Amino acid sequence: MFGAMPAKKAQHFWPSAKRLMGLLKPERAGIAAVLAMVTVAVVLNVIAPRILGQAMDVIFGGVVGKQLPAGVTKEQFVDGLRSQGQDNFAGMIDRMDLIPGVGVNFQELAYLISVVLVMYFVANIFLWLQGYVLNVLVMRVVRRLRDSTEQKLNRLPLNYFDTRQRGDTLSRVTNDVDNIQQALQQAFAQLVSSALTVLGIVIMMFIVSWQLALIALIALPLSAVAAGIIGSRSQKLFAAQWKNTGALNGQIEESFSGHDLVRVFGRDEDMLARFDEQNEALYRASFGAQFVSGMIMPVMQFVSYLSYVGIAVVGGLRVASGGMSLGDATAFIQYSREFTQPLGQMAGMANMLQSGVASAERVFEFLDAGEQDAETATEHLPAKADGHVDFQHVTFSYTPGKPLIEDLSFTAEPGHTVAIVGPTGAGKTTLVNLVMRFYELNAGTITLDGVDITALSRAELRSKVGMVLQDAWLFGGTIYENIRYGKLDATEDQIMTAAKATFVDRFVRALPEGYNTIIDEEGNNVSAGEKQLITIARAFVANPSLLILDEATSSVDTRTEVLVQKAMAALRTERTSFVIAHRLSTIRDADTILVMEAGRIVEQGRHSELLELRGAYYRLYMSQFAGEDADAAAPEGSPGDPGQVTEGGAAEEPARTTADDTTAVLG
């Protein structure tokens, strides 16, 4: 999901910047070393032009001195010029370090040039070292930040993800963290280096010539005004660029996740049109932001050129009048050229830093999101729990003021299968999510073997529960590894037993690579039914005390459903099971059927008992077996009977399927 991130504007810049700098506290020693090395490098780079100017004076003085008559002193020659009224020329000669009749002092020149080269070499060594140290400590900071975001992901409640676009959340923990890394690596050191360079150059310019320094400093407020005006306009465009980037990421994520559905409904053109619309919006915002922000450097360069022209003219006049030496003028011109460069870098880095702080603000907002209630584990369960689940006056709502489940009570006996049925939105999945503590109750209690689940750690509670969901999810890796995911320390015998019991072994043996077959990223190299069987095997190898099956057969064909049903029957053996089902034909053998409507249990009992009540379950059942099927589905005395009528006229209960039956049927 993403490259170099566009800049954006932080809503609370200084608090976020302060908190971002706080991430560097564990690296204080490294930061101090970086600052020290940058300072040394800047000092050397700033002093070097002055020494180079002295070398220029040696050359110019030697050239001019060679042309003067020998046998007189410089003072005598200057006095002679003044007596002839050539005061400017006399002043220029007086400023020079020369001896009439003597040429360039190459020994002194070599020494000065050697000093300059050594200074530049040492300065760049220090700059390289500070870059290396800064890179190491920034990567450590970013690694800790990534660790924090990953840990935060595991502490967030499900309702956080329910109320946010996944693309935006992924962008925060990937794009924004990368943007913070870039800002710290580039903007931090560059801003410090540029600021120190500007300060050092200003000091040296005033040492060389305060008059020329004032001319050079005229560029500073002009550049600041230009950068401020242009920067304020670009910030709005950068904010729009970031917003549109997030929207485009969400659109891409949605397109990829729902690719099959898009193809099924023939919405390729619609999705492409939506992508083009988002992409065009991002293009316009990005182009505008880059165009406007790109004007900063040319405008600042133009201002610097105006300053440069002024310095060259005034400097030349001062050299000609003897007000300063040619070497000082040369050094000052170099200072003036170097003066605008760090200013431009500071403007660009400030923009990058603001982008990094804005990313930090988004990451901090993610890290500050409300977490699951703190663990208050005071109880423990045996390695193999009985699976006695008791709901006592449970109340829950996703949104305050809109209750979903109110005062719900029921008991699931150990080893029993409890089926949960009802219309969409009745609260079926919510019920099992509460058992898993994906959400916390508003009121009431849920106990497992008499222990309040809130007194157990979430890890211990969930270690007792196995889930097989409607959407079978497989990880990238082999089939063997996907089964072992249910219990990472499972032996090969345990994995093979699970695979055989859930009929995975039947189709895996036919694959060229067998259990070493790699599941691709989308799991498309196995069928939907095979994926579901693998997830059942994964739950089987975990050997849970409590099993949750959430409409596990809804996405498979009828033939495969038989296999899945048999595999689930084997999985349910000797453990308490909650089965959420829309196909009522799949839960006839349940020990208890809970019929939910609007968050309440309106009926509960066995299949035959609920049909005889002719209530909510009867209506649901008959709606699935209309017409000819209804004649064979209704209880005795009604238009149709789901059981076989005996000679005595009583309907037999449909036979239950067991693991042994499975073996007999499927061989």
Image: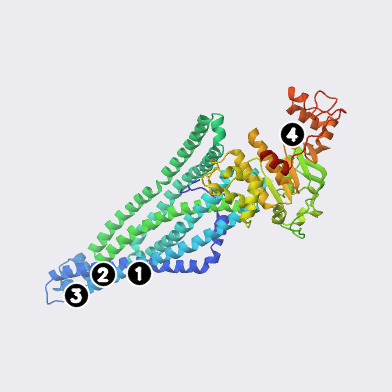
Q: Position of residue 397 (x, y in %)?
A: 75, 43
Disc with the residue nearer the chain's start (3 vs 4): 3
Disc with the residue nearer the chain's start (3 vs 1): 3
Local secondary structure at mark 4: helix
Local secondary structure at mark 3: helix
**Residue furthest out toward the right:** 648
Residue assigned mark 4: 584
Q: Position of residue 335 (x, y in %)?
A: 33, 61
- Disc 1 and disc 4: Cα gap in Å? 81 Å
Q: Residue at x 31, y 70 (%)?
A: 118
Q: Are marks 3 and 4 in contact (CB under 8 Å)?
A: no
Q: Dot 2, crowdedness within 10 Å: few (<14), some or many (≥20)?
A: some
Residue assigned mark 2: 113
Q: Nearer the viewer, mark 3 or mark 4?
A: 4
Residue assigned mark 3: 75
Q: Is residue 292 visible?
A: yes
Q: Amino acid at mark 3?
A: Glu
Say left or right for 352 vs 206. Answer: right
Residue assigned mark 1: 122
Say left or right for 26 vs 321. Answer: right
Q: Dot 3, crowdedness within 10 Å: few (<14), some or many (≥20)?
A: some
Say left or right for 535 vs 516. Answer: right
